[in-house]
Amino acid sequence: MSSEGTVVGVERLEKVYGGSIHAVDSISFEVGRGEIFGFLGPNGAGKTTTISILTTQTLPTGGKAEVLGHDVVKEPSRVRKGIGLVPQELTVDDELTGRENMELQGSLYGVPYSEAKKRIDELLELVKLADSAHRYVKTYSGGMKKRLELAEGLIHRPEVLFLDEPTLGLDIQTRTSMWEHINKLKKETNMTIFLTTHYLEEADTLCDRIGIIDHGKVIALDTPAGLKKAVGGDVIEVEVAECDEDILEMIRNMPAVTLLDGVCSGNRARLKVPDSNFSLPKILTNFIARNVQVVSVAVKKPSLDQAFLEFTGRELRDDESSSGNEKADPGARKGRFRRRR
Ligand SMILES: Nc1ncnc2c1ncn2[C@@H]1O[C@H](COP(=O)(O)OP(=O)(O)OP(=O)(O)O)[C@@H](O)[C@H]1O
Ligand SMILES: [Mg+2]
């Protein structure tokens, strides 16, 4: 089903839990070699479920998915050979040192010891953990553990790397350094990277293309620039001392201005215009001429935030929480490739 150069091919893929929860609802997309492809969506959108299917941990209930030309249902072991996974939930072992965790991972993937040793040194260097490699992981910070997870996912030099919320819960500094690692990987190895995130800024900076997923459906798929362009125009948020129907009517009558949401919210009106540089002076002149007291004005250039709002009808909040949808499996110490559900 996939064309040449396609590394991940998904066609009308479905996962229904318990007969009624459509976690993944007939999605189709392709990811090309060397791409950083981002799956962007709110909590519960279906991102982890999609990754679980593509990494052969969960069986789909419908549709088809291929990774590196292999069907994830019919040839799971061939798929696993070529992929790496950094899961949303931490799987590193607290009771081992960083290096021991890496060694264990290497042996699980059958990397010969002498080769593994060399790669472990390189990878620990890459994620800046070389100096802490001898320490027990229980003494690591959350960011260090995430970086160790990333290094573990790379031990067998996968062709495709799946990163499920690689920066969730990390502070901004650690997030930035994680982005640098991911970018470096792409530049140096031409690895295909499939990542999920609900950080818009992260998706915007890192990804070549982004699929916006909501309620199990891919509702938009394009380059970050393409998604922003689809939004079209700038948004001007005007706060007035007191908003009333007359003011709203005035806005509605302004040429080339669209009143978003149709109402004021907390005395703020959101106005969409093709170009704020051109429209803002005219809008303010109108307000002043009508003796409307303007408290504040904010201009928002097209952003992924707006694109998301436009496509889904709501904002994707940059919250730190995860839905906790994952059913933790305490028995699976090395949970990278857990049993299928
Ligand atoms: N094992 C399961 N059994 C039943 N329902 C599940 C299971 N795993 C996930 N779900 C449901 O499927 C939907 C999608 O969940 P999923 O974990 O894929 O979302 P997500 O986009 O990764 O969210 P988050 O941003 O919180 O990680 C949710 O409604 C979730 O409750
Ligand atoms: Mg998830």
Image: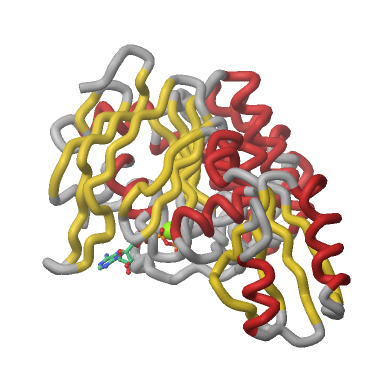
Residue 134 seen from this side: no
Colour option used:
secondary structure
Outermost residue to the top = 4
**What quarter of the picture does the C terminus occupy?**
bottom left
* Residue 90 location (% of width, % of height): 51, 58
Residue at image x 61%, y 67%?
A: 320
Q: Is residue 267 above or below residue 207?
A: below
Residue 63 location (% of width, % of height): 16, 41
Q: Is residue 225 left or right of residue 77?
A: right
Taking 328 as reference, is 247 left or right? right
Residue 203 appears at what percent x and percent y?
A: 59, 44
Q: Going 74% across and 44% down the picture, which residue do you hit?
A: 177
101 with respect to 301 (left or right): left
Q: Is residue 56 left or right of residue 278?
A: left
Q: Quadrant of the N terminus?
A: top left
Closer-to-camera residue (181/279): 279
Which residue is at 68% across, 36% downward? 181
> Residue 106: horizontal and vertical position, in percent?
47, 34
Q: Is residue 63 above or below residue 208?
A: below
The image quarter in which residue 248 lies: bottom right
The residue lying at 26 percent from left, 27 percent from top is: 78
Q: Where 1 falls versus 24 (above or below)?
A: above
Q: How many marks?
A: 0
Q: Quadrant of ligand 1?
A: bottom left
Residue 301 visible, this angle? yes
